[in-house]
Image (tube, rainbow, N blue to C red):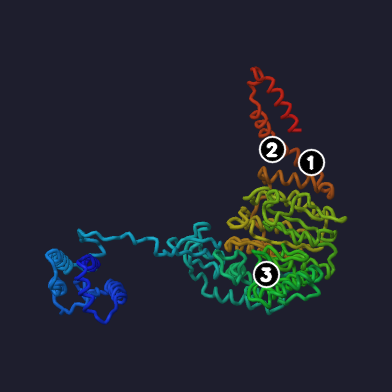
């Protein structure tokens, strides 16, 4: 069809002009536009066995609908009485072409079964003109992006239609959502609404949760979902409900919003007013990664209020222990600033509430993979609160960059801040439990707290996309078990970070089972830490021994057992460098003078 159009245009000018004169109602410009419009229209028309009518190409021929396309074309061209013999040759080509196209279907054109001798100019065809949309989906478990042609996440292996939000970690990661329990959804809904009750026996484990905290979410749509999302609470609540733990074995506590007076015990008016201001805005940001919407301020007050009430309830003996299933998290929020996904510092507010209830000394153990810079800042000068943090540090290169081993407290409170900064990623159960055995528990026992709080970030868990460490649910359960021996078992666990839904829901469930009295299956007889972990432990012991005499014997025993093992490869690396700088054969050759000079320079640099 396009070929016929081209043949006429390339014919004698008179032929084209006569054709255009038939369309006397069109101007020259209109006729040209009409050619393009009708040609495009003909391309889109479904035809029954024929290529189309010549008149549809804009030549204006009066024709009848016949079966012979060649006859139609000849009618158009023979109306030019002044056509030359050269034009007649063109007519023969056109007639043959029309005859050949009469038997050709659109499918034939598409499959390119016919190859014409005429040159078609395809220079204006650009295959990149059409934007190809690449379909993607984000994993509900870890939020990583995947292409549409895969069913399982390339990062965590979770199925695209996983039922983790309905059944928690009990749902299969390899299969689409299936009903594990006909009442499963009812259990999850009841866990959201059960917090209106406030009945808990004295020996019970209480859980603080309110579904209004799910309204805190990022409004602005970005290329990647924010890791701190409402699904974190949904997955944990679904896991507890499916297992019959909450509601069931655990008891709820009535949710309330923290008061301004209680917040002022920890935060400055600037922090309180900045968070409150977000309730009048659809979307806002404290830092590029710390968002807020119109519901965030209430969610933060509910989280802080639940933590405060859980602390006072447990310390007063109305409950044995508890778990705060809350968000937004809090341990990065300092006196003035909100940062690191955190608005109000829930652990600090809980410690203040416990002190208001009568606790003289409060222990906060923070095992979130990120250092709790806000909690450290708040209690940096306090001797009534001991803050211990285990986190990735890597020389200050890991967020937030604080928490070095030599940050021990200020203004007479030296030693009441204990930082255990891991020097690499991938730290697992053995390093954490070894640090608990030789640093955390000895210092905490000497401190003798009246109340213990765990800032339980599960982003050090295996599979977390941000933490990239290797702590298992059994490891978290064992650390919880070791802390239950302190402060008469008065223990509050507060959720902080953790962004792999399967990891955090499984780990939180394991921790709550310990609170309920179950013992973790973990062998502590002969734990061998990694070399890098052992070096960190030695570094912390060397610093903290000055403030905690109970560490002296532990430090001496570890030096005798592990000292050579921990630092043996460091000396080898230094020796290799020294030998590599100055070739030994220079010592006997003509360059022995340079050898002596360079050797002295090398010794000077080493000193």
Of the two numbered discs 2 and 1 on the same chain, state the one appearing first in sequence.
Answer: 1
Using the image, determine if residue 510 lies above or below residue 219: above
The secondary structure type at the circle numbered 2 is: helix
Residue 277 x %, y %: 71, 75
Packing grade of label 1 (10 A; few <14, some 14-19, many >=20) is few
Q: Which residue position holds label 1?
A: 556
The secondary structure type at the circle numbered 3 is: loop
Residue 569 x %, y %: 67, 36
Q: Which residue position holds label 3?
A: 326
Describe residue 286's horizontal placement relative to residue 145 as left or right: right
Give the camera-side residue of 585 and 184: 585
Packing grade of label 3 (10 A; few <14, some 14-19, many >=20) is many
Which residue, as the protein is rendered here, is positioned at the far right?
412
The secondary structure type at the circle numbered 1 is: helix
Describe residue 41's horizontal placement relative to residue 253 as left or right: left
Alpha carbon separation for disc pair 2 and 1: 15 Å
Residue 177 x %, y %: 49, 68
Q: Are marks 3 and 1 in contact (CB under 8 Å)?
A: no
Residue pictured at 65% horizontal, 71% vertical: 284
- Pair 3/2: label in front: 3
Query: In the picture, residue 477 is in which quadrant?
Result: bottom right
Query: In the picture, residue 270 is in which quadrant?
Result: bottom right
Residue 526 showing in the rendered view: no
Quadrant containing the N terminus in the rendered view: bottom left
């Amino acid at each position: 069809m396009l070929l016929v159009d081209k043949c006429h245009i390339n014919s004698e000018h008179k032929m084209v002009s006569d054709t255009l004169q038939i369309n006397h109602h069109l101007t020259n410009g209109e006729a040209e536009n009409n050619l393009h419009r009708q040609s495009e229209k003909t391309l889109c028309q479904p035809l029954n066995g024929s290529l189309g009518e010549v008149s549809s190409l804009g030549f204006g021929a009066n024709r009848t609908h016949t079966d012979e396309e060649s006859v139609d074309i000849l009618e158009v061209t023979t109306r030019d009485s002044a056509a030359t013999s050269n034009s007649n040759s063109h007519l023969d080509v056109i007639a043959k072409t029309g005859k050949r196209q009469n038997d050709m279907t659109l499918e034939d054109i598409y499959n390119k079964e016919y190859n014409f001798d005429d040159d078609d100019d395809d220079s204006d065809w650009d295959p990149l003109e059409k934007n190809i949309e690449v379909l993607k989906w984000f994993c509900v478990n870890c939020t990583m992006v995947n292409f549409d042609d895969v069913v399982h996440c390339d990062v965590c292996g979770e199925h695209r239609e996983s039922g983790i939000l309905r059944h928690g970690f009990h749902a299969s990661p390899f299969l689409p959502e299936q009903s594990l329990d006909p009442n499963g959804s009812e259990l999850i809904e009841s866990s959201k609404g059960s917090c209106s009750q406030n009945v808990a026996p004295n020996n019970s484990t209480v859980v603080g949760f309110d579904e209004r905290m799910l309204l805190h979410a990022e409004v602005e749509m970005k290329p990647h979902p924010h890791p701190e999302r409402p699904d974190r609470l949904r997955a944990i609540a679904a896991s507890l409900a499916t297992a019959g733990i909450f509601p069931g074995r655990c008891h709820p506590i009535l949710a309330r919003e923290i008061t301004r007076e209680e917040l002022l015990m920890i935060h400055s008016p600037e922090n309180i007013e900045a968070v409150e201001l977000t309730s009048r805005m659809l979307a806002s940001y404290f830092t590029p990664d710390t968002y807020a919407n119109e519901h965030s301020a209430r969610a933060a007050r509910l989280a802080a209020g639940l933590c405060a009430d859980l602390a006072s309830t447990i310390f007063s003996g109305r409950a044995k222990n508890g778990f705060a299933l809350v968000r937004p998290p809090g341990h990065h929020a300092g006196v003035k600033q909100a940062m690191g996904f955190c608005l109000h510092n829930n652990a600090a507010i809980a410690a203040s509430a416990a002190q208001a209830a009568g606790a003289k000394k409060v222990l906060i153990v923070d095992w979130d993979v990120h250092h709790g810079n806000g909690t450290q800042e708040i209690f940096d000068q306090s001797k009534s609160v001991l803050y211990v943090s285990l986190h990735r540090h890597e020389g200050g290169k890991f967020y937030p960059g604080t928490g070095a081993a030599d940050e021990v407290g200020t203004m007479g409170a030296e030693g009441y801040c204990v930082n255990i900064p891991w020097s690499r990623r991938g730290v697992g159960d053995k390093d954490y439990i070894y640090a608990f055995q030789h640093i955390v528990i000895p210092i905490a026992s000497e401190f003798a707290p009246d109340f213990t709080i765990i800032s339980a970030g599960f982003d050090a868990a295996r599979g977390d996309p941000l933490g990239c460490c290797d702590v298992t649910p059994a490891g978290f359960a064992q650390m919880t078990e070791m802390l239950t021996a302190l402060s008469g078992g008065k223990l509050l666990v507060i959720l902080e970070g953790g962004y792999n839904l399967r990891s955090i829901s499984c780990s939180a469930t394991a921790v709550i089972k310990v609170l309920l009295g179950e013992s973790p299956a973990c062998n502590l007889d002969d734990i061998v830490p990694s070399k890098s972990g052992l070096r960190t432990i030695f570094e912390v012991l060397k610093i903290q021994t000055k403030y905690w005499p109970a560490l002296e014997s532990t430090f001496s025993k570890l030096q005798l057992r592990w000292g050579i093992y921990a630092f043996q490869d460091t000396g080898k690396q230094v020796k290799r460098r020294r030998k590599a700088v100055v070739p030994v054969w220079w010592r006997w050759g003509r360059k022995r003078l340079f050898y002596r000079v360079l050797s002295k320079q090398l010794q000077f640099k080493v000193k």
